[in-house]
Image: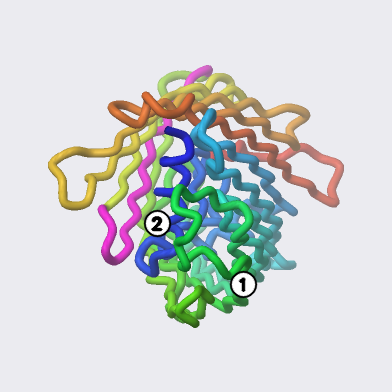
Amino acid sequence: MKRKLLTGLIGLALSSTAIAQQDAAFSQYFFNMMYVNPAYAGTRDYLSGTLIHRTQWVGVDGAPSSQTLNVHSALKGGKVGLGLQLINDQAGPVKTTGFGVTYAYHLPINDETQLSFGLSGSIASLRISGDQIHIEDQSDLAFSTGSSSAIVPDASAGIYLHKQRWYVGFSASHLLQTKFSINDAAGQRSAKYYRNYFLAAGHVFKINDEVDFRPSFLAKYVQSAPLIGELDACFIFKQRFFAGAGLRTSKRINTDGADNALVAIAEVEFLRMFRFGYSYDYYIGKQAIYNGGTHELMLGWDFSKAKTKMENPRFF
């Protein structure tokens, strides 16, 4: 069964439509917003960073494993943000590594509200290792050429409107819709990244002096794929401890079913500079039969040249 699942995964990865969906997705997106929207760079007013490791579909051979590191900061005056992002994603024999640089401009609307614009350029290396593909028909010529690789340049852009207690942003990745080639027994096959569109928003409501409530959502759309939506809600205790849950859903292509997951989230801020987070995705329906869920670990930080603590809490 595991071999059949892996073969199916490889088939998806080698199709041009499916490759557009191979970007790693992270459950703790609200503290990793620069991965989704380049306009987020520099909005935290400090030298900020986030490191995330995600292990998906535990128990499935060749299941995706993803890591991302982003670092960003506002320049003097706070109107410009710069960022750097690294990504590593392994799904079966398909490995993607890359880096991107981000520029953001922050336009003050009033004393508390900013409208940010961001642009990111990136380069990714995509490699398919033929020796990691387990096939039932050893004479299948489509898998007889070993490894194949490609260098893929790309770009993304976004806008981000925010205050201390709420945000809304829209962004698009794979703006260049870069085409690249994959070698197989028949020669070169053309593949392509399709644009991804993201809409994200969140708000923090004050319940009392000790507890806040933060609902948020993220929606993603890519051509030839179902719309993916995630709705999350966290309680924040003493502005340091986050605990909540979410629901991610997407309709299956050409069927009446849906692929849903429940997400449990816990985060803690310590030393007023660091954040540690953990999330667990539990899949609902037939997916749960074949895997033990998804684990995600996050470490974040905010450094300042000044020796004072952060004046205002950061909720996202």
Can residue 212 be seen in the rendering of this structure?
A: no
- The N terminus, quarter of image: top left
Q: Measuring 64% from the left and 25% from the top, which residue is drawn there? A: 268
Q: Which residues are magenta?
A: 210-226
- Residue, disc 2: 12
Q: How many marks?
A: 2
On the rendered structure, is 55 left or right of 306? left
Q: CA distance from mark 1 to mark 2?
A: 17 Å
Callout 1 secondary element: strand
Q: From the top left corner, tell me how far across and down residue 290 is, in percent.
A: 41, 28
Answer whether residue 151 is visible to the viewer in this image. Answer: yes
Q: Position of residue 104 (x, y in %)?
A: 58, 70
Q: Residue at x 38, y 33 (%)?
A: 232
Residue with the mark numbered 1? 149
Q: Is residue 229 left or right of residue 193?
A: left
Front-most of 129 and 71? Answer: 129
Residue 213 highlighted magenta (yes or no): yes
